[in-house]
Image: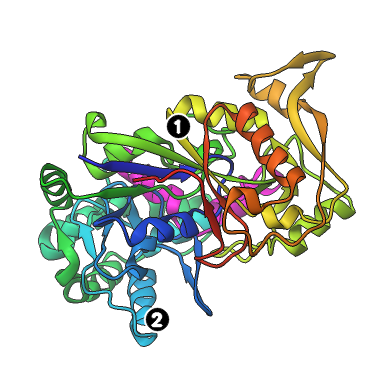
Amino acid sequence: MPALVLLGAQWGDEGKGKATDLLGGSVDYVVRYQGGNNAGHTVVVGDQKYALHLLPSGILSPGCTPVIGNGVVVDPSVLLSELSGLNERGVDTSKLLISGNAHIITPFNVTVDKVTERFLGKRKIGTTGRGIGPTYADKINRVGIRVQDLYDESILTQKVEAALDVKNQMLTKLYNRRAIAVEQVVEELLGYADKLAPYVSDTVLVLNQALEQDKVVLFEGGQGTLLDIDHGTYPFVTSSNPTAGGACTGAGVGPTKISRVIGILKAYTTRVGAGPFPTELFDEDGEALRRIGGERGVTTGRDRRCGWFDAVIARYATRVNGLTDFFLTKLDVLTGWEQIPVCVAYEIDGKRVEELPYSQTDFHHAKPVYEMLPGWSEDISKAKSFSDLPKNAQSYVKALEEMSGAPISAIGVGPGRDETIEINSFL
């Protein structure tokens, strides 16, 4: 039962799309198990660049079946637009499977997301405004609308009515907005039913049967460990579980079926949106990382906040995910620095702390304790093996591996699919 989980070990945007795509030719299924179209992946295949927002990266690998699991929230208009765009570029999307239990992002979820964030002002979370959080809130409040509801107009209407009973009160009386008509929402959602029907499936059954048949299944997380609703920098987090445990609930497979958990680490650190970020840089180095690394959100278009590598966060990700391996990405971005700082601990109220503090207050006040590592100036984008890297680059990788608590099995030395050094096989 070769089931693997691949997830972000920082705040997201670590390069999961490339890692998934690299494995895509060797796996039978690639499964998105949480998040929505607030998590984007950029995949470069030859001279073609693909920006994926909701679809699993495996959709670009012939022979691989991409799956949107029950833990994902789906905006039908975004999904259909993304499928259309890939079809126009000659990508076969016919094998896509969508869980009938996945929840739908409705127009009123998007509206609530935007007006709520605007209302918060300086206290805003930094959401993408795409309705992700309100959809997960509806799911937990048991007023959510699932993909399967599109195929029973009576149930769909009842659920939309139930959801809008409270939301319209909030929109009109608190936010001074117009009420949303039930009929309008139902009509729009029903318009997606026929278009989505060929893809809707009992994905839990499909995936478990595939594992029983020794098929290789890769579970792909969106966002990253530090954005997990339970284990991230709350409240500046997403509304789902990108950590390894989320793969079980978000796809419907038991933990005993997972054999490997791979964490994606960027060779430095970035995050999008508000929240604490101990190694964040506000100087020329931060701007250089942003420029050289092309640090702009695939889905949001927002510039990413940039900082040096944080080993405290990496160790935390190893612990809460049970990581077996790391895939280190964007090592090439660090080429040209004479010395590269690495955060090995924090200073909080004058005390050295080597593990992530559980207290939100302490983490907000954490100051990075840096260790300086020698840099390199040689171009590493053509390196095919670890020995091809400059000695200082090798030393940097080994230092990060030792500090992070799990072996580094692959290294990204450029954006292309073939610009990867594989040290140990993932399969």
Q: Residues within 10 Å of mark 1 (few under 14, many from 20)?
A: many
> Which residues are drawn in magenta?
115-140
Residue at 50 percent of width and 76 percent of height: 46
The type of residue carrying mark 1 is Leu
Residue at 45 percent of width and 56 percent of height: 131
Percent x, y of residue 24: 35, 60
* Between 367 and 258, the one nearer to me in the picture: 258
Which structural element holds mark 1?
A: loop
Percent x, y of residue 276: 70, 36
Most extreme residue toward the front is 387
Percent x, y of residue 369: 81, 26
Q: In this orientation, does residue 344 appear?
A: yes
Q: Which residue is mark 2?
A: 85
Q: Is residue 11 above or below residue 290?
A: above
Residue 131 lies in magenta, yes or no? yes
Which structural element holds mark 2?
A: helix
The type of residue carrying mark 2 is Gly
